[in-house]
Image (tube, rainbow, N blue to C red):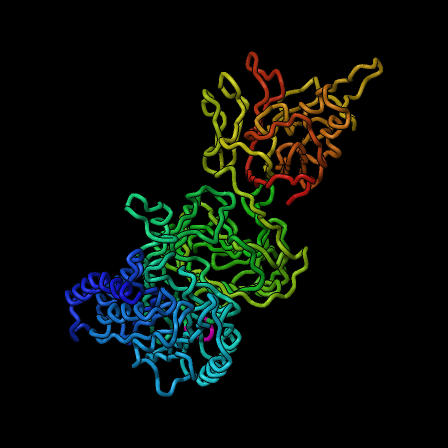
Amino acid sequence: MNGIKMNRIGNSRRVVSWVLAACAAMGLAADVPLDRNLVALFADLHATSAKNNPHQREGVARCVRDVLALSPRPANVLFYGDLSFNHGDTNDYRLLKELVKPLEDAGVRWHACFGNHDRRESFFSVFPERKAAAPLVPGRLVTVVDTPHADFILLDSCLEGPVNGGIDDAQRAWLQQTLARAAKPVFVGAHHPLAETGVAGLMASNAVYTAYLYGHNHAWRPHLQNGVDALCLPSTGHWGDIGYVLVNLAADGAVFTLHQRDYYTPRPAATPEAIKPEWKARVAKNDGSQWRVSFKPEDRGFVPLFNGKDLAGWEPCNIAPETFTARDGMIVTTGSPVGTLRTARMYENFVLEFEWQHMKPGGNSGLFIWADGLPVAGSAFSRGIEVQILDPGFNVKGKNEWYSTHGDIFAVNGAALTVAGRISPDGRRSFPSEERTRPSPEWNHYRVVANNGDISLSVNGKEVTVAKAASPRKGYLMLESEGSECRFRNLRIKELPSTGPKPEETARAADGFVPLFTGTDLRGWKIPEGDNGHWKVLNEVIDYDARSEAAGDKSLWSEKAYKDFQLVVDWRIKETPYQNPHVFNILPDGSEAKGPDGRPAPLTLPDSDSGIYLRGSGKYQVNIWCWPVGSGEMYGVRRDPALPPEVRAGATPKVKADNPVGKWNRFEITVRGNTVSVVLNGQTVLPGVTIPGLPESGPIALQHHGGLKDGAWNSPPSLVQFRNIFVRELSPLSVEGNVP
């Protein structure tokens, strides 16, 4: 057996020799300076001479080579456990000794802690010089690495057997005493995550800044856990994110930069052609990512609200995919269409800081706080509180009367707010106490403190605007697109303790709805062939004049088919030029009211007609019209004599909830299994009708209706507009008919 192991080491000599030669070519002489403010972090090295795992030793070699290619070089390299692959095999440590020798030859000091793959006795048999005569904690490899601006503590979380780790009482007591004496920031680290070492409580209560560094999970992930900033490190070559992290320390903080070289699981692809596209995409996305921490006491608890690379954590509300993009470390909006980008989750009490820059004099944008997930019917904006982001060059009538350009705070679309401080003459806005906004294209800094419904805004370092008693006081954060390019950077947030908002003080959730209309064009919809521009986007709404020139079906269908779903759609009838002589009063059972002669009695009323087709069939339409019964009726179902009476009655509105012609309305339509329910303007018009024969799946359509003869309408036309179209796909009903 020993002979086999030695052969494995012999096979690995080629790799080690190549590493040594490469490092020698880079120059190991003392003329390359060492910087004590630079620290390299390796994790999950998994050194092994096994011939079927060359990627593991080559990964360590590559990280060593990359570090030695730097100028200046880091004075220290820290290894966060799992130094061995074969659970403390002595030959693993012998190989590791050769792999790290170039660091030692260059004067770079390395320090290590143990992971679950390590064994103390085997390690110290190969590295006897690392066994301290008077260890900081008896029986454990615990190290303090001193740098000018921060200390790094490496704890021993190896339990020698289990995959999980832990910290013994002796280490915990030593750590508590050490942190209590700390005079500068401390990065506590171990192989295992916080949940297993359980030291968050000791760190969160510490007077100086502390953060936690660990390996084990093989993934780059900065996060906040139990009040402690934490960073999970990549593996040097085992599996997952592959690479190392370089730390640049300064008096006021540290920057952790990921140098990612690969990604694979469970092992590398056999050939370049076999590399999965998602692996390449992850490397391209991650490489160069940074985690910035501040040592300033006032900065503790902040986390990035934008990762600097993409819009992860943000969701488009009622905008086109390109309206907001991530570029050069900024979130950039084109300004078109008018709408918002919202956070993926709600926030209650917080401190939010960011910088913004208008690229056009007079540019308009805003920050919404405590906002609903979807816009109000007929509006581009949600109910919420807006913090104005307006360039001083904005100059329409009413400046300094109903608006200013330096940080107004005001309620939007039904939110409540008590204005305070300097108040606008119309009494609707909190105005800033002084003008501190810099004009385009200069950058401005906002600090928003929102706590228990009260809000304060500081512009470029000074508080200028206050407001109180907002409702909602928990909801989404939103960045506004409104007309021109605006840029945002360095967004960060610190959450404050909850003050227990009541349900009515909490914004309405977005609940997974995604937009079906971009506000700029008809992407995602099938324009009828030969339509000739009659279905169009006009002023950021879908506008139809009922004059489609298509030879066949003139309705506008979604490209995608839907099975079970909820649909939100805002609509309005523009005008009713046609006098419809075939209108009827519809009775609760779905029949049409009769006259003295026993026949249905028609009425003549101004009318326009459209609707929403469900699951690919015009028979299953939710009607938009001007009949006395109101919109939401399902005409094709109600009038089908083959259907049971209860179904026809169920397709008849229980209440008329339409707004007047010209005003916006909102449908909330749910289709699940064979059951359809309709809410119009907040009132349930169809509680739920189960329809035999309803197709299992199909696209959604905005209905065409009407025709012209000799230039005059001969049936009610679809003179309608649509906006704020959102859909949420639902999971199927269980056998019992309950939502899983």
State the residue at coordinates (52%, 37%): 516
Query: In which quadrant of the rendered view does residue 135 lie?
Result: bottom left
Q: Which quarter shows the N terminus? A: bottom left
632, above or below 302, in the image? above
At which x and y percent is residue 419?
61, 61
Q: Is residue 296 magenta-colored? A: yes
Regarding residue 410, the answer to whether it shows in the image is no
Query: What residue is rendered at 42% in x and 79% in y?
Result: 140
Boundaries of the magenta span:
295-299
User: Which residue is nearer to you in this view: 311 or 608?
Assistant: 311
- In the displayed structure image, the side of residue 674 where residue 264 appears, left or right: left
Write down the quadrant of residue 120 in the picture. bottom left
- Residue 350 locus on image (x, y percent): 54, 64
Residue at 35% across, 53% down: 267
Up-down relation of residue 50 to residue 161 (above or below): above
Locate the C terminus and report the quarter of the image it occupies.
top right
* 633 sits left or right of 512 in the view: right
Q: Position of residue 242 (x, y in %)?
A: 34, 58
Instruction: Name the foreground residue: 542 vs 444.
Output: 542
385 or 159, which is in the foreground? 159
Q: How many labels, in total? A: 0
Residue 396 in view: yes
Main secondary structure found in the magenta portion = helix
**Quick one: which residue is furthest to the bottom in this view?**
134
Q: Is residue 169 magenta?
A: no
Front in this rendered view, residue 337 or 320: 320
Asked if 424 appears above or below 376 in the picture, the reply is below
- Residue 351 percent location from the top left of the image: 51, 65
